[in-house]
Image (cartoon, rainbow, N blue to C red):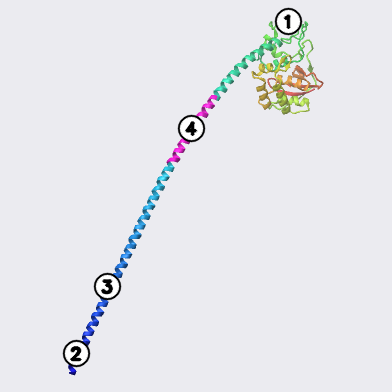
């Protein structure tokens, strides 16, 4: 019985161990299944997260690509708009330049036409002035004399001609300076104004009134003046002593511009200017004031009138003497200024 009881006990123990082993096996299987399930769930979640991230990345890339495409299209559209704007601006600028060029061309043509009309008008006025001066003074047209300044000085001399000229059997002849009466001149049969040589010599007697003996200086000193285009004004300023060449140039130019109809030697200033330059008084005065024109006989006559002084003009004579070829009487008490005419366009001061 004891053995039987031991045997049963052992059998029960074995059964118990078997059941425990089965229970452990089931528990282990359940744990394994649970872990596998959890691992599967984790893998599924991770896979789902991976796919979600991939999808999100794909969406981000898609949106980025769309944004870049929008930006590219916007940039292209902006570039097209800018190109169109520039094209229109260039077309507008080209049109403006074309219109401006046409306007400049029109203005140039208008100016040329006006200049031609003014030139034609000045030609007519110059011919009238030449005719008037020739009638009143005997002065031929400028292109008929070799030394226009000497001819002008002769015509501008302030003393009037005598109504009836006295005979001068011993001269000097107005035509050739010979020792015979002018009407008996063996060299020039025509009137003085018909002879170029006679007009070049006109004035050597020293005064408009040829009945007076020529004025000859034998004790005068030449004061040289710079040949800078203002030598006459320098010479006048030296004699006047109270001004400068530039001030005198401006003063005379302004007077000419303001008084073109003022008479000098019986004729308006504008006629003398037309004869000498072919320009109107205002344009002549502007160029004179700017220094681009030399002073001459007209300015000498105007200076004498404005400054109310006498102005004597001399040439070199024989044996160091000086012969007066012209004088301008300003009608005042300002004394006399003496100039030496060196020919053509140069003057020096002459200290008497």
* Disc 1 residue crowd, few under 14, some 14–19, many 20+, Cα 10 Å: some
* Quadrant in the rendering for residue 345: top right
The numbered mark, 2 or 1, whose residue comes first in the sequence reads: 2
Is label 4 in contact with label 2 (beta carbons under 8 Å)?
no
Q: Secondary structure at mark 1?
A: helix
Which residue lies under the disc numbered 4? 94
Between circles 4 and 1, the one closer to the viewer is: 4
Which portion, as a residue range, is magenta? 80-106
Q: Is residue 231 left or right of residue 116?
A: right
The numbered mark, 4 or 1, whose residue comes first in the sequence reads: 4
The numbered mark, 1 or 3, whose residue comes first in the sequence reads: 3
Residue 224 visible in image: no
Which residue lies under the disc numbered 1? 183
Between circles 2 and 3, the one closer to the viewer is: 2
Between circles 4 and 2, the one closer to the viewer is: 2
Q: Secondary structure at mark 3?
A: helix
**The stretch drawn in magenta includes residue 97:** yes
Which residue lies under the disc numbered 3? 33
Between circles 2 and 1, the one closer to the viewer is: 2
The numbered mark, 4 or 3, whose residue comes first in the sequence reads: 3
Which residue lies under the disc numbered 2? 8
Real-space Cα distance between discs 2 and 1? Answer: 197 Å
Real-space Cα distance between discs 4 and 1? Answer: 76 Å
């Amino acid at each position: 019985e004891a053995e039987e009881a031991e045997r049963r006990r052992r059998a029960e123990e074995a059964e118990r161990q078997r059941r425990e082993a089965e229970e452990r096996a089931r528990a282990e299987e359940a744990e394994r299944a649970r872990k596998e399930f959890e691992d599967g769930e984790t893998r599924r979640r991770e896979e789902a997260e991976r796919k979600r991230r991939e999808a999100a990345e794909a969406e981000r890339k898609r949106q980025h690509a769309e944004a870049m495409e929008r930006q590219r299209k916007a940039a292209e559209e902006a570039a097209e708009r800018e190109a169109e704007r520039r094209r229109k601006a260039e077309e507008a600028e080209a049109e403006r330049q074309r219109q401006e060029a046409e306007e400049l061309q029109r203005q140039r043509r208008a100016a040329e036409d006006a200049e031609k009309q003014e030139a034609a008008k000045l030609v007519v006025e110059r011919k009238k002035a030449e005719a008037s001066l020739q009638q009143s003074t005997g002065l031929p047209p400028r292109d008929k004399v070799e030394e226009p300044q000497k001819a002008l000085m002769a015509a501008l001399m302030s003393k009037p001609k005598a109504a009836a000229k006295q005979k001068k059997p011993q001269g000097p002849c107005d035509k050739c300076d010979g020792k015979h009466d002018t009407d008996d001149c063996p060299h020039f049969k025509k009137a003085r104004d018909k002879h170029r040589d006679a007009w070049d010599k006109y004035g050597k007697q020293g005064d408009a009134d040829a009945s007076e003996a020529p004025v000859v200086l034998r004790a005068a000193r030449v004061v040289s003046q710079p040949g800078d285009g203002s030598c006459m004004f320098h010479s006048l300023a030296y004699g006047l002593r109270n001004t400068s060449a530039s001030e005198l140039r401006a003063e005379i130019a302004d007077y000419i511009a303001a008084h073109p109809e003022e008479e000098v030697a019986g004729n308006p200033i504008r006629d003398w200017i037309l004869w000498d330059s072919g320009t109107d008084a205002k344009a002549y005065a502007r160029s004179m004031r700017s220094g681009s024109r030399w002073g001459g006989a007209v300015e000498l006559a105007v200076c004498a009138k404005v400054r109310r002084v006498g102005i004597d003009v001399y040439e070199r004579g024989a044996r160091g003497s000086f012969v007066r070829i012209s004088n301008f009487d300003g009608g005042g008490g300002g004394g006399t200024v003496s100039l030496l005419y060196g020919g053509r366009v140069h003057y020096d001061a002459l200290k008497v």
